[in-house]
Image: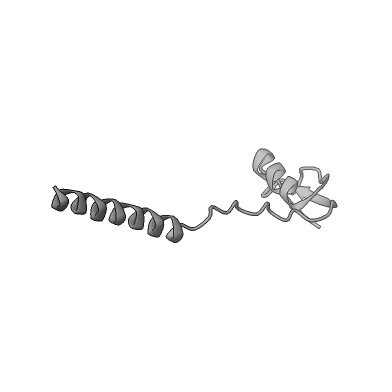
Amino acid sequence: MKHLARLGTIALSMAVTTLAICALLQQPVQARPAPDCGPTFQWTCIVPGCPDCPVYLFEGTRCEKAAYEKKTGRVCSL
């Protein structure tokens, strides 16, 4: 009976040690930083390949400009 109790104690000790090691080795989850969109600029936007098309003015941050270019197909510059 003592032998069985000793094996149980050893198994419990190993399980607790394993859980403690796993807990110590895990890295905390870090959120990705928000993109730095910067200040608002006035952008001059054109339709590429269309010299007769009008020039459009767009006011927004770098992130807003990227979304505008993707949505409209225009290319903007300062």
Q: In this view of the protein, which residue sits in the foreground, 49 or 59?
A: 59
Q: Position of residue 17 (x, y in %)?
A: 35, 58
Residue 56 position by quadrant: top right
Left or right of residue 7, residue 70 in this image: right
Residue 65 in picture, x, y percent from top left: 74, 48
Residue at the location (69% across, 48% down)?
66
Q: Nearer the viewer, residue 35 or 44?
A: 35
The C terminus - image quarter: bottom right
What kind of colouring is applied to the model shown?
Answer: one colour
Residue for point 45% across, 60% down: 24
Residue depicted at 66% across the width and 38% down the height: 71
Farthest residue in the front direction? 2
Decide which of 51, 69 is in the foreground and name it. 69
User: Where is residue 9 drawn, in percent x and y?
Assistant: 26, 52
Q: Position of residue 37 (x, y in %)?
A: 75, 53
Q: Is 69 left, or right, of 43 in this rendering?
A: left
Horizontal arrangement in the rendering, residue 37 relative to residue 5 (left or right): right
- Residue drawn at (24%, 52%) of the image: 11
Give the image quarter of residue 18: bottom left
Q: How many marks?
A: 0
Residue at the extreme top: 71
